[in-house]
Image (tube, rainbow, N blue to C red):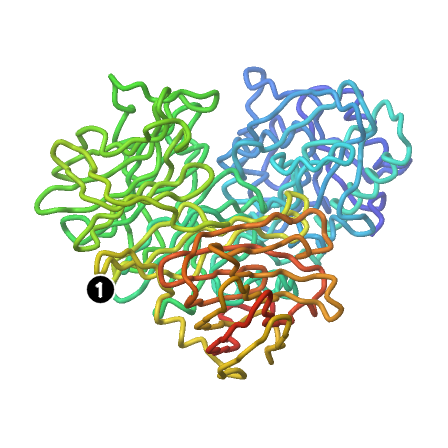
Amino acid sequence: MDPHALRVAALSVGEWTPEQRAAYDWLAGGTDTVEAVSLDGLGPGALAEYDVAWWHRDRPLDWEAFDVGDAADPLGGYLETGGGLLLTLHALSAVDALGIDPFTPDAIGHESTPEPSGYLAKAVHESHPAFEGLDAAFHTRGADKDTAFARYEAIVPARGDVLASGRVGDQSLVGHKPLVEWRVGAGRVLGAGSGLSFGNVRDYACAATRERFVANCLGVLAGPRRPSFSDRPADAAGFRAVRDRLADDHHRPGYHLAAPSGWLNDPNGLVEHDGTYHVFYQYNPAGPFHGSIHWGHATSEDLLHWEDRPVALAPDPDGPDRDGCWSGCAVHDDDGTPTILYTGGRDRKQLPCLATAADDDLTRWEKDPRNPIIETAPTGLDILETDDWEAEFRDHCVWKQGEKWYQIIGSGFHETGGAALLYAADSLDDWSFVGTLHAADGPDAGAVWECPELLDLGDAHLLHVSNYDVVRYFLGDADLDTPGFDVAETGLLDYGDFYAPQSLTTSDGRHLMWGWLPEARDLDAQWESGWSGALSVPRELVYDDGRFHQRPAPELAALRDRHPEADTVTLSAGERRPLDLDGNQYELSLEVERDPGATLELGLFESPAGSERTALRWEAESLVVDRSRASADDRTAGDEQRAPVSGDTLSLRVFVDGSTLEVFAGDATCLTSRVYPTRVDADGVTLVARDGGVDVDLDAWELRGTFPAGQ
């Protein structure tokens, strides 16, 4: 579509600036198809005769000089009936006043760009017609000392799809969100807030790209073939469409729970309600990077097959959670209503907030108008203050004991490090500080304890905390009155890529835990893939015969499909045995006995010629994941991970799924890893004995997937 042939309403308020004139003159191209239309006094039907409307503005809006909101109704009527609107540079900051989105871009002004600037398309939106004829990363403005911009940074639009992030030189600025698409009735709005200056052109290559990009935007807004795809879906068909766009990625897990796209981190609000399991998780719909946190939601009837549900919690532009709805938990209140207690973030404050379910599906939630329900971190304690936060005070574990409610909140002290703070209440909206349940005895244990959780395992209490690095657990006895925690044993829940776990208690009394499996590849690799993060398989936690056990939930056995291996294998030193497995979606069960000094090596993710290979070794007193040859992509982790084990016999359960590797050793020690072979056929599995003989009772199953990914 030739943009110069379109009938375009060139919107403005007041006199045109030189930049506006340069932009609109470029579009007019010597024709009469571009006409000036003032937003000040815009009447009903004033835009009906135009194919598309474009508001380009390089100066901040003067809200005292004019009320852009006066144009909201006629512009809204134009959009409702199918009109198209392009907002560029500072015009993007009018989306709230125009009724398009309640979140206005939080970064608006002028900046210096010492290198060319532009856009980086999101993976799920690379086929959007706005990017026709362009690379995924492209520059629209040359290096400039004065470039106008309007974009989302700490926040995201409430209703729009973020189509691209920012790009300066070769640097991906994924937290910059300058390109957004909205659906308003039958109409469409595109907002492009950076790199689109038309005056004072110095870089003609960038100018040509800019013109192509703007022409694409105007063309799709004016035409009848607007894309229907959204990566913020509200129904099952929409979620399937998002997952389908990433389904050919062999790194995507097939049976581990992952977000449809974008970013996932901590599991939150795990609860069983009316026979359905609900897992919420920290989620960024803007892309595969941490920021602008919402609560994603998935449900299951069997802990295996998960259904995507709409976002449960989203930041409120006027609320204490404007900058993010962070980690928390879900319980049933005194009346049996599911209730979420989460951390809301705004400016430099992070404080507890409450939300209650508004339907039986736990799809809609109503935030308490009194939020935050705890207005400040406890006084009189040396709670850590950082550049980001007035007090490190977040993440909640809530339970009821007798007639009283309790919760612990993660925190940290300046001198000694992490702490779990104990609160008590008669109701979920009125909490009193009791004291410090447990705290680090030195900074080596972590400056802040995130995502604390206390579980009653019968003969012992389990307290676990995440300290930015590892998940440390304490077994012992919790005193909720004094308060305090008498530690009998301490250790790590996992020795690898596993963080911020949370548990639920099932109706039959079991404790099941999920953890976040963070990526072990750099930000560019995550952005290119379109997704980041997965949750572990559910782990059953048991304290029995004086020992703490972690084992895969028995429900996982229902995923077993082809059973190619069930054998007792005896290997002498140097002998190898390939396994008859197809694909990287399987379970191994091994009972191993070795000669003194011998090593069992399990080769995983093996390419046919062996150029890519991850080795899982049981050597001496350690279980080792060797990733030195795991991938030819140098953006992925190649370090070694170790977990302590002892003896000359060992039980192993190994779960492989796309890029995830979870190992359970002796029902107690866990080692989780992420690996990313570049070759799709890097799916070989081999048993090897080194420095002595090894006997293995082996079972192997290929596992059915539960998501359309990696299959």
Judge by depth and name the residue closer to the eye, 273 or 592.
592
Report whether 141 appears left or right of 358.
right
Above or below 479: residue 417: above
Q: Position of residue 17 (x, y in %)?
A: 76, 20
Instruction: Tell me which residue sits at (56%, 49%) in the image.
Output: 519
Report whether 116 appears left or right of 511.
right
Instruction: Tell me which residue sits at (56%, 68%) in the image.
Output: 692
Q: Position of residue 500 (x, y in %)?
A: 41, 45
Mark 1 lies on residue: 507
Judge by depth and name the residue closer to the eye, 435 or 80.
435
SS for dot 1: loop
Which residue occupies the extreme front position in the image?
Answer: 596
Q: Position of residue 620 (x, y in %)?
A: 50, 57
Q: Amino acid at mark 1?
A: Ser
Report whether 539 appears left or right of 338.
right
Instruction: Tell me which residue sits at (52%, 38%) in the image.
Output: 291
Report whether 583 appears left or right of 561.
right
Q: Split into 4 quadrants, where in the image is the C terminus?
A: bottom right
Judge by depth and name the residue closer to the eye, 162 or 426.
426
Q: How many discs appear?
A: 1
Above or below 56: residue 248: below
- Please tell me in which quadrant of the rendered image residue 448 appears: top left
Give neighbour class at mark 1: few <14, some 14-19, many 20+ (Cα, 10 Å). few
Instruction: Tell me which residue sits at (40%, 56%) in the image.
Output: 669
Q: Position of residue 293 (x, y in %)?
A: 47, 41
Which residue occupies the extreme left position in the image?
Answer: 403
Judge by depth and name the residue closer to the eye, 481 or 145.
481
Above or below 236: residue 17: above
- Please tell me in which quadrant of the rendered image residue 680 appears: bottom right
